[in-house]
Image (cartoon, grey):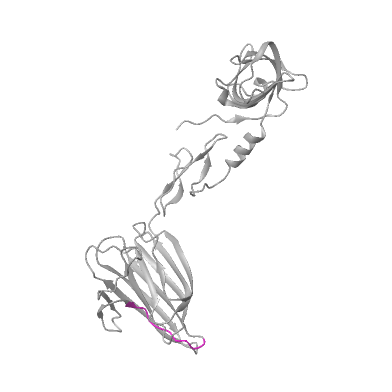
Amino acid sequence: MATEMPININDMVKETADVVGVGGNYSLNGAVAGFFSFVGSGFATKKVIYRATDGIDIEIAEATVNSGSPDTITRPATDGDIIRSTNNDSRVNWASGTTVEIINFVNASRMKSLIDALELLDAKGKILTHSGSAVMAKAIGATNGHVATVNSAHAHGWDWEAQAPGGSEHIETIDASAASSVEFTTGINANHRKYIVHGTHLTGSADPMSPQLDLSDDAGSTWKSDANYDFDESPVGTPSTNNTFLPLGSTGTAAGENMSIEFWIFAPAVAGYKHGWFRTVQTTHAGALDANFETAWRFDLNSGFVCNGIRIRPSSGTMTGKFTLIGYSI
């Protein structure tokens, strides 16, 4: 990718120049008394914004300064490259013998565009970086779940890369209030190898409030209620097979009673039987630890099942609490 030449700015740069017509370049005559020349200010071969006037007409444009005998400023080749002028924003047709006063200049609209380019993020979340010039260049857009890393081989010094093993991504948090269900139907895909749902300080309107979990393969349009959910609390429990949902424990409605859950699913985007485990902590109204258990589970509907939706719902009534979905790249 070609790098655009930066715009150079300096104070107190002013010269007179001879010019003819619309196609002639500015032939610089040297600095006006009390000011500096363009070449003397270090602008040789560099791009500047100039403002030229004979006291009547004005022309403002970007151009390159050339060192020579005499020094020159190359005018734009087309009217469309003129920033502003008294000739309908086209090149001024300077009369033969015209001498103009020409200065290094940044007009308001150009300054605004340079400032606007300093935005760090665009509307799509792409990071804007400095490419070694005054031009702000947009770095390569990232894939969801990728992270920014230093990369000296990239033109901008960094790039997007897939997360290293062990990296995590917060996908969604739902604050449920008297909800009939909580559904996660976006962000469950091949970007991560496992997903965890945390449900904290859960309470319900019915006693007992028993949260149940269902899976979906069509992003929540339907939920699997086939008798294919198995779970095993061994060695403290007995395996339970052919359930139509996964039971995640229960809590009551007395003051202080609540529960928290943690549900794991491994490789949901890989076709096949699904498995993982869940952990439940229940607290009684007296503040005592009522139950604390871990349970392995599996869902064996068919060998082609791909999970992209998780729903938690109370067995009856409604539930309140905070639910968070996190993806892990391991």
- Residue at x-position 45% and y-position 48%: 149
Q: Main secondary structure of the magenta part?
A: loop
Q: Residue at x 26, y 64 (%)?
A: 305
Please state, as top left, top right, bottom left or bottom right, where the C terminus lies in the image.
Answer: bottom left
Is residue 53 found left or right of 134 in the rendered image? right
| Nearer the observer, 82 or 260 | 82
At which x and y percent is residue 108?
Answer: 67, 35
Q: Which residues are magenta?
A: 246-255
Q: Is residue 303 magenta?
A: no
Seen at 44% across and 33% down, the residue is 1
Relative to 209, does residue 30 appear above or below in the rendering? above
Q: In the rendered view, tell whether residue 214 sits above or below residue 45.
A: below
Q: Is residue 263 above or below residue 293?
A: above
Residue 280 x/y as whole percent: 39, 78
Residue 111 spot, x, y in % from top left: 64, 36
Indicate the quadrant where residue 216 lies.
bottom left
Instruction: Confirm whether the magenta stretch covers residue 253.
Output: yes
Residue 28 position, x and y percent, is: 67, 15
